[in-house]
Amino acid sequence: MSTETQVLAVTERAATKAIQLGSREGYEDACLRVRVLAGGCSGFTYKLSFEGAPQADDHVVDAFGLRVLVDPKSAPIVAGSTLEFNDALLGGGFKVNNPQAVHECACGESFSI
């Protein structure tokens, strides 16, 4: 049974783009997993991937027709964050805007809290 909490916010633009990409990858009712992994030059990095369904202990965020999954270990790190999407040619893509991040590396791929 999944835990229904609002661990992070999702913008409408990010939800729409994720649904489009999930559909393109063959997921009709895609769930977007947001995971925090140890690594990168600043300590942590985000990994986004599509899955068919939530795991039993996932936090599930429903936003604009998209289900976003966050595992229990990642939840405290992303708490209060917003998943955004920017379609700029340079520096565009999905971004987790995390108010807990005290430092981001120059490439924007990793962060520390």
Image (cartoon, grey):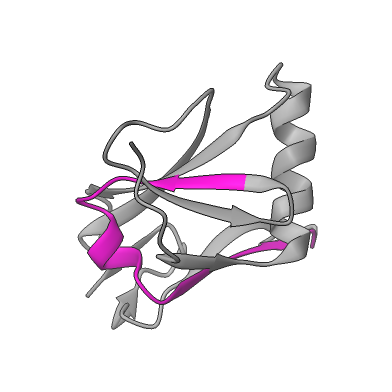
* Horizontal side of residue 108 vs 38, given as left or right: right
Identify the residue at image location x=80%, y=57%: 89
* Horizontal side of residue 42 vs 27, given as left or right: left
* Horizontal side of residue 16 vs 113, given as left or right: right
Along the line of sight, the residue nearer the viewer: 103 or 29? 29
Instruction: Answer with the quarter of the image where residue 14 lies.
Output: bottom right
Identify the residue at image location x=58%, y=45%: 67
Along the line of sight, the residue nearer the viewer: 102 or 5? 5
Above or below, comparing residue 33 to residue 9 in the picture:
above
| Spot occupied by residue 39 in the image (x, y as percentages of width and height) | 22, 49
| Spot occupied by residue 65 in the image (x, y as percentages of width and height) | 73, 48
Instruction: Answer with the quarter of the image where residue 54 lies.
Output: top left
| Spot occupied by residue 27 in the image (x, y as percentages of width and height) | 68, 21
Above or below, comparing residue 1 to residue 86 in the picture:
above
Which of the image's four quarters has the C terminus? bottom left
- Residue segment shown in magenta: 67-88
* Horizontal side of residue 82 vs 77, given as left or right: right
Identify the residue at image location x=30%, y=45%: 71
Along the line of sight, the residue nearer the viewer: 46 or 66? 66
Instruction: Determine if the magenta segment contains residue 104.
Output: no
Which of the image's four quarters has the N terminus? top left
Identify the residue at image location x=50%, y=34%: 49
Above or below, comparing residue 51 to residue 38 in the picture:
above
Instruction: Determine if the magenta segment contains residue 87.
Output: yes
